[in-house]
């Protein structure tokens, strides 16, 4: 099956549809990061076919190939990788019944669900796409049933996989970084705070979260910098200081290394998501995915 993007349109809000399929993307190729600071007003079930970095809110995951995420409505997301192409498939669904189905089946939101391949997601996305293409219009009962069966298969997969239990010390370390990433962080201090060795902290943090504690803090700082640069009342030096950098030149150098543009250029010409540069939205037409 060739890659495709299909948008089906969002119904009038007054109709209060129980379940609406808005967009389906199938093995769509990309070359850049996608950033959606305001999220999407719908649930997204998204399968990444290549290894990518995925930031949901304030957490960043280094996802291996064939990893599924479920993003809730309004969730800020950033995903992709610095170099090399990547592809993903997804469905965007909305309606009163969707959060109930997600909760009923115990599907984790904003967490990676690793699969050995994409056969399962491909199968249900194609079934849903074909139903949405029916000449007389899709049958709502069939659409709901297809989504339910897919969710049940995801639940069975996660149960069979056995979700890894993350040690409480590492969870505490991540929570501390999330709330203190603007402070001066030292590994030895963080390890002492959660009562583990420095080596255990570094190795365990990387194993469970995909990055070191310091790298995690830097990524949070860079994300915060992007948000602050949209404020015209702050100059670059002030942005650097509010992101925990006393040296504006080091901040600018690091920002350019991570984002490909200096803070000043980023402010004047913020990079558009890949779909705007190529003329197509990686999640169908419309803004921010």
Image: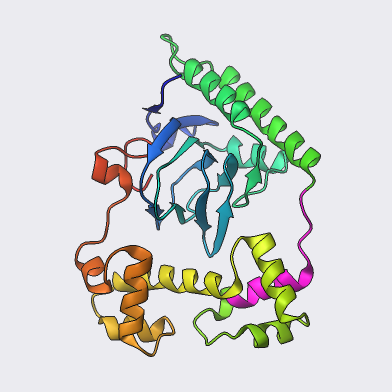
Residue 114 lies left or right of residue 169; in this view the side is: left
Where's the C terminus, which quadrant? top left
Q: Can see residue 234?
A: no
Residue depicted at 78% across the width and 83% down the height: 195
In the image, residue 176 above or below residue 65: below
Q: Where is residue 46 in the image (x, y as percent from the top left)?
A: 53, 40
Q: Where is residue 30 in the image (x, y as percent from the top left)?
A: 37, 41
Q: Can see residue 272?
A: yes
Residue depicted at 48% across the width and 16% down the height: 130
For the record, the magenta segment spans 163-177
Residue 174 located within the stretch drawn in magenta: yes
Q: Where is residue 32 in the image (x, y as percent from the top left)?
A: 36, 49
Residue depicted at 78% across the width and 66% down the height: 167
In the image, residue 138 above or below residue 40: above
Residue 23 located within the stretch drawn in magenta: no
Give whichever of 270, 234 is nearer the camera: 270
Magenta stretch secondary structure, dominant: helix
Q: Where is residue 125 in the image (x, y as percent from the top left)?
A: 53, 26
Residue 105 lies left or right of residue 41; in this view the side is: right
Residue 187 lies left or right of residue 139; in this view the side is: right
Residue depicted at 65% across the width and 29% down the height: 150
In the image, residue 73 above or below residue 212: above
What color scheme is it? rainbow
């Amino acid at each position: 099956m060739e890659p495709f993007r299909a948008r089906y349109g969002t119904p009038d809000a007054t109709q209060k549809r129980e379940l609406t399929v808005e967009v389906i993307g199938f093995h769509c190729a990309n070359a850049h990061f996608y950033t959606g600071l305001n999220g999407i007003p719908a649930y997204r079930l998204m399968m990444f076919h290549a290894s990518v970095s995925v930031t949901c809110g304030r957490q960043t995951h280094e996802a291996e190939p064939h990893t599924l995420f479920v993003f809730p409505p309004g969730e800020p997301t950033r995903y992709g990788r610095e170099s090399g192409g990547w592809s993903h498939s997804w469905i965007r669904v909305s309606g009163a019944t969707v959060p109930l189905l997600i909760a009923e089946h115990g599907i984790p939101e904003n967490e990676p669900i690793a699969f050995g391949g994409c056969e399962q997601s491909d199968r249900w996305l194609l079934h849903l796409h074909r139903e949405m293409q029916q000449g007389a219009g899709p049958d709502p009962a069939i659409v709901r049933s297809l989504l339910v069966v897919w969710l049940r298969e995801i639940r069975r997969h996660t149960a069979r996989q056995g979700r890894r239990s993350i040690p409480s010390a590492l969870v505490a370390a991540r929570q501390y970084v999330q709330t203190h990433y603007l402070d001066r962080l030292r590994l030895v201090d963080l390890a002492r705070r959660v009562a583990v060795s420095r080596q255990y902290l570094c190795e365990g943090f990387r194993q469970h979260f995909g990055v070191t504690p310091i790298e995690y803090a830097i990524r949070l700082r860079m994300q915060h910098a992007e948000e602050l640069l949209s404020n015209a009342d702050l100059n670059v030096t002030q942005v650097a200081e509010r992101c925990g950098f006393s040296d504006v030149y080091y901040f600018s150098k690091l920002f350019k290394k991570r984002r490909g543009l200096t803070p000043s250029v980023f402010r004047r010409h913020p990079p558009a998501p890949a779909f705007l540069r190529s003329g197509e939205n990686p999640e169908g037409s419309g803004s921010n995915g």
